[in-house]
Image (tube, grey):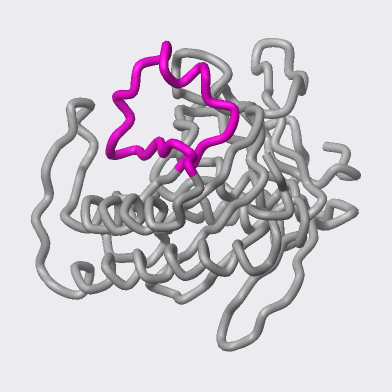
Amino acid sequence: MDTNNFLNQEFVNKINKIAIDAGNEIMAIYEKDFDIYEKMDESPLTEADLASHHHIINELAALKTGFPVLSEESADIDWKERQSWSTYWLIDPLDGTKEFIKKNGEFTVNIALIHQNKPVLGVVYAPAIDVLYFASEEIGAWKAEAGQTKQINVSDKAETPLRVVGSRSHQSDAMVGYLNQYPSYDMIPMGSSLKLCLVAEGKADLYPRLGPTSEWDTAAAHAVVNAAGGACVVFDLDKNTEQETLAYNAKESLLNPYFIVKGPEIIV
């Protein structure tokens, strides 16, 4: 992949616009009554998921990058086909559907470009609060909010008490047990991929995810964390040890292992 073509500011801006426009599609439905369906796994699927999905798919196709697309709403692509992909788009048209249904604003549009199992570009847009995170290996990590755009970085030292961000909807017993090792911490509840972004911008020190997630849930924000100087590492709960960096499209299952997000200099 020629990174000059796909990781520069001009191209990232195109992905930003796609994410923002998809967010506008979502908000048009968010502000009225909406239908809720059930997927095969019984998780909620709204009109907004589908509207955002179709918008992103169409707009990415118009860019003519030639890269295949894997979306949460079209994830039934056989492993025999996927394993030949070296570069592809990985999207979650509406991350945090439960937060969307609760109307608490903590949901996002996630668009990532994966190259050789690694997220090299990521855009996370939270349309209800109009906050945009975007990053690539070339331009670094950025946040746009209230008309201002600034570069972001992870904290280089953990605060006391430790600032831990966790899911508003999925607080697992494993995470509660893991956190018992720390004498004190402040819990910051947050929905969707915004949890990773809080670590990326230095507003949280640690995000342990010791519960189920899928690759589209994390890829875009993982790119932001990487570009902000942080890390998203696989965590072995039994051994209480960190392992390799979280990888994408490296196995048949699209489920992530347990992982921890943090700044590289933070020892916890």
Residue at 20% over, 75% down: 31
- Residue 71 is situated, as x and y percent measured from the top left of the image, at 37, 39
* Image position of 95 with respect to 105: above or below: above
Which quadrant would the N terminus be assigned to in this image? top right
- Residue 16 is situated, as x and y percent measured from the top left of the image, at 52, 66
The answer to whether any part of residue 76 appears in the image is: yes
Residue at 40% over, 46% down: 92
**Residue toward you, 264 or 12:** 12
Q: In the rendered view, does 201 fall on the left or right side of 25? A: right
Q: In the rendered view, does 138 fall on the left or right side of 25? A: right
* Image position of 70 with respect to 23: above or below: above
Whether 26 is among the magenta residues is no
**Residue toward you, 183 or 239:** 239
Q: Which residues are magenta?
A: 66-90
- The answer to which quarter of the image holds residue 18 is bottom left
Residue at 64% over, 58% down: 198
Residue at 72% over, 28% down: 245
The answer to whether any part of residue 179 appears in the image is: no
Q: In the rendered view, does 32 fall on the left or right side of 143? A: left
* Image position of 242 with respect to 134: above or below: above
Q: In the rendered view, does 59 fall on the left or right side of 237? A: left
- The answer to which quarter of the image holds residue 139 is bottom right
